[in-house]
Amino acid sequence: MLNLQTIAAISLLVLAACSGPKAVQVNALHVDSIEPNDNAHGLHWSGRWQTNWGQLELFAADGQIRGAFRYVSEGTERVGLLVGKPLGNVLTFTWVEQGGSNKGRGRFVLDGESSKFSGIYGYESSEEDGGEWCGVRADGG
């Protein structure tokens, strides 16, 4: 099993390898709410996503989904990690920004084509007080 430091190192390498311009907060992106389905199978979380907060890279390992995100807030680029366990089309996760200044929980719900997700995030023990976090697949896959 990978520890948090190993996950952080891998995730930062993945972000460094992402091509294209630095992430910019893209609040205009919106995905309509997707219904949770505990019986959904064959979904593909891994890949590069463009979200309403910037870039998100997800990958599957050891029955979990791990990821690295990057966004810009008040002119400063921020990076962070998330880790969670999928059940059907729902990924429930915890997240933390580099340095641990912000952290919390969240939930993504993936559509049947694995092409977009709707979601929410929160700070500390809340899963929803942060607002919407949604995305569309950016890697075509």
Image: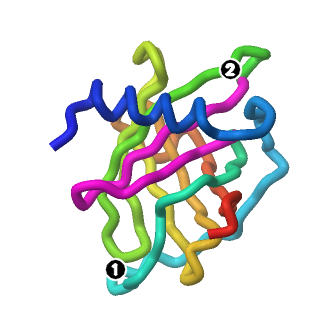
Residue 103 location, quadrant = top left
Q: Is residue 94 left or right of residue 98?
A: left
- Please state the horizontal and vertical placement of residue 5, each as a whole percent of the image: 28, 25
| Residue 99 part of the magenta-drawn span | no
Q: Is residue 118 left or right of residue 126?
A: right
Q: Is residue 50 above or below residue 115?
A: above
- Please state the horizontal and vertical placement of residue 117, each as a whole percent of the image: 59, 65
- Residue at 50% x, 38% y is 68
What number is the disc on residue 118? none
Instruction: Provide the secondary structure element on which disc 1 rests.
Output: loop
Q: Is residue 68 above or below residue 137?
A: above
Q: Nearer the viewer, residue 14 or 25?
A: 14
What number is the disc on residue 38? 1
Measure the C-alpha gap from mark 2 to mark 1. 35 Å
Residue 96 location, quadrant = top left
- Please state the horizontal and vertical placement of residue 48, each as a whole percent of the image: 60, 53
- Residue at 41% x, 67% y is 90
- Residue at 72% x, 26% y is 72
Dominant SS of magenta comes to: strand
Residue 64 location, quadrant = bottom left
| Residue 57 part of the magenta-drawn span | yes
Q: Which residues are magenta?
A: 54-72
Callout 2 amino acid: Glu
